Image (tube, coloured by chain):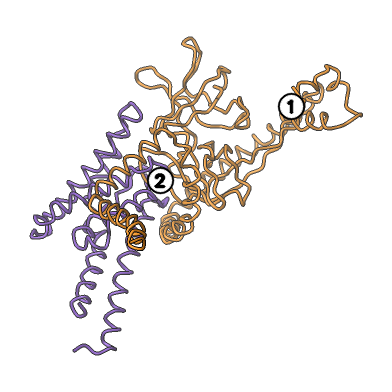
Chain colours: A purple, B orange
Amino acid sequence: MIEPSQRIFTSLQTGLWLGATYLYLLILFALNLAALPVFLAASIKPPFLLMGIYFVLLMRADLLPLVALFMIGVVFDLLTGDLVGLNALVFLLLALTVHAQKRFLSGQGWLVIWAGFWAASLAAAVFTYLLHAVMALSWPSLLPFVTNVILGGLLYPLVVLPLHIFLRRLHIAKMHHP
Amino acid sequence: MARRNLARSTRKPMIHIHAIVASALRHAPLSLVGGACVLMILSLAAPHMWQGSRISVTDIFAPIITTISQPFHYVADIVGGMTGITQLKAENERLKSENTRLKEWYQTALLLEAENRSLKDVLNVLPDPSQSYITTRVIADSGTSFVRSLLVAAGTQDGVNKGQAVMGGQGMIGRIIEPGSRASRVLLLTDINSRVPVVVEGANQRAILAGNNEDLLTLEHMPSDSLIEEGARIVTSGHGGMFPAGLPIGRVVKNEDGTFYVRPFTDPNNANFIQIIEKPEDPHVRQSVDALNAPDETPARVSAPARPSEFSADE
């Protein structure tokens, strides 16, 4: 029998780690847009938001329902000035792919999950690149495209580390108060 | 019997709504993917449709983005300050010599300005409207190399309007396309949708400066026999009345294949602060409108050609 005070404490803990997860996703969202005072930051920017979304979808897909992903994508497109619906489509396709491969990915080690992100990031980048090439009727520069994929892949473990901690804490809190 | 029929008739729409909701939930992934595709097609077909939404979303998110990027700017300032100390001496020496050189140029500029003013007085040239600036910080970029735009922390509240030219440290970098109330979007010259009427100084050749999502800009609508030299300055021509004439943009560079490109004076990707040039009141237009509005004491020059019928609402 759980005591009421302990129940409140556990609920608070759950809320805290849930809030931290969403706040971190918001930071990743803003990082993808912010004009960072870093060399070549405007043209070369790793897909921070994609990293966060991929990780949360793998670990706790229920935290990011499809409608939320759609809305995040649309708002992101409105802010970037890109085609409206493009990132919404990318995030939805990512969610559906992760959902389809979840049984395979859930039993795998860290390296396979990391490789999965490389594949997802590359697929998203190729899709975006081809779409822009069709729109512009010319091939956009390959350098930022390739750099973003490589940089994103390399930074992935570092960027999702806080998310890993938050989701683990959330899992522990849930276990104490199912 | 009648009551039963009434109950059935009131229940029927509920069943339909339930069915629609259930069907939508069952097919949610497909519906959302389809919705995203429809949005993309609409965005391609009618990009202006999204302007209002973009401005609203930008106004909402601008403070969040500014807050989140603040620590990065703070760290960059500290790092810049620390590394700057070692370079300070060399920089100081360079600036001293540059200052001496600029002082000489300043005297020359004063002489030329006085001469120019007196010549304009002789020719009775109407003075160009004076320009004022709004200086502000860049808060966000497009985050992708496929779209070249910036978000700046100034909006209509600060006097920003659509179409105003945006200057970097040494030259023009773009123009305002979506002014929000607190933040605005700048379309950079390097964006594939950017077109600006320009003049090649020296050759006095008009052209259209076009972006292509690359660092170098292209000159379009140039005659094949135009005499352009590498290193020539590119400035705005002022045609179309969108931008003031003479804003510096960049310098002509020659490619290995012989084609000419323009390298902007300011790299828009590294701009932290920008200046928005407020559109000046055109003294010519103001005079004409004032003249038309004046009832009797209209100067002869305006009323003589019997033009009022052209402006009357009846015709």
Q: Foreground residue, B235 or A64?
A: A64
Element class at badge 1: helix
Q: Amino acid at mark 1?
A: Asn
Q: Residue at x 32, y 34 (%)?
A: A132
Say left or right for A104 vs A161. left
- Disc 1 crowd, CA 10 A, few/some/many (<14, 14-19, 20+): few
Labels 1, 2: front one:
2
Q: Position of residue B119 (x, y in %)?
A: 78, 23
Q: Foreground residue, B31 or A122?
A: B31
Image quarter (top left, top right, bottom left or bottom right) of the C terminus of chain A? bottom left
Label placed on residue A171: none
Label placed on residue B116: 1
Image quarter (top left, top right, bottom left or bottom right) of the N terminus of chain A? bottom left
Q: Position of residue B152 (x, y in %)?
A: 51, 48
Q: Is residue B313 visible?
A: yes
Q: Position of residue B249 (x, y in %)?
A: 53, 32
Residue highlighted by disc 2: A80
In the current view of this chain or complex, which residue is farthest to the right?
Answer: B297
